[in-house]
Amino acid sequence: MSFEDSPSLEEYGEGISLQPPERPSARRWVWVAIGILILAVVVLGGVNLQRSDAFTGLAGTGAITGEVVDEAGEPLEAYVFVLLTDLETQTDANGRFELQGVPAGSRVVVVAYLGAGREYPIVVNADSITDMGQIQFASTKTP
């Protein structure tokens, strides 16, 4: 408080007001910034939890099965994997595959054969087997 703003002797004699001084607006912005930072930490923590193995344990896992065939219905020995996971397998001689331990929820299965790949979105339910059925992998004609 500056000297000019200090109470005079007459004001002092009547008593000094008990109202607290006004809060500076800079202090309010500090609390707003702290609140925003706390909110960001909570949101990022939730996103990180969702991607972790702990969340997979909470949500559960399932299995995916299917059969990969060519245009003529003949089995293909293709690679099958689930995006954003380490899960992958190769089809057997009959074109069949099975992936265990797939995290529950919306997933994308990729079937790859001879340098080409196709994505198939599916929903995996916990503690159940999701059968993709027969996947026909049609080749594209290149010039």
Image: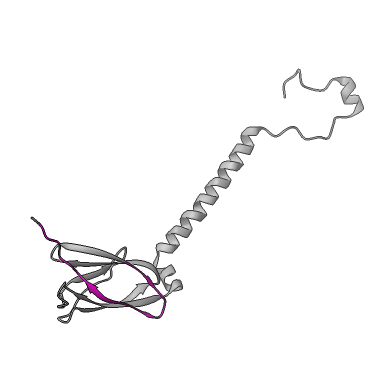
Task: Give the residue furthest to the left.
Answer: 143
Q: Report x, y in % for residue 110.
A: 26, 66
**Above or below, comparing residue 103 to residue 7 in the picture:** below
Q: If the image is split into quadrants, where does the C terminus sit?
A: bottom left
* Quadrant position of residue 79: bottom left
Task: Give the residue furthest to the right.
Answer: 14
**Between 124 and 8, which is closer to the camera in this rendering?**
124
| Residue at 43% from the left image edge and 59% from the top image edge | 48
**Above or below, comparing residue 11 to residue 140 in the picture:** above
| Residue 65 on the magenta segment | no
> Going by the image, does 100 lie left or right of 52?
left
Q: Which residues are magenta?
A: 121-142
Q: Report x, y in % for residue 115.
A: 14, 62
| Residue at 37% from the left image edge and 77% from the top image edge | 62
Q: If the image is split into quadrants, where does the N terminus sit?
A: top right
**Count of marks overlaid on the render:** 0
Q: Report x, y in % for residue 11.
A: 88, 23
> Going by the image, does 101 lie left or right of 72?
right
Instruction: Identify the colour scheme used.
Output: one colour
| Residue 130 on the magenta segment | yes
Q: Is there any visible trace of residue 117 in the rendered image?
A: yes
> Going by the image, does 43 lie left or right of 143?
right
**Between 23 and 55, which is closer to the camera in this rendering?**
55
Task: Give the residue furthest to the front.
Answer: 72
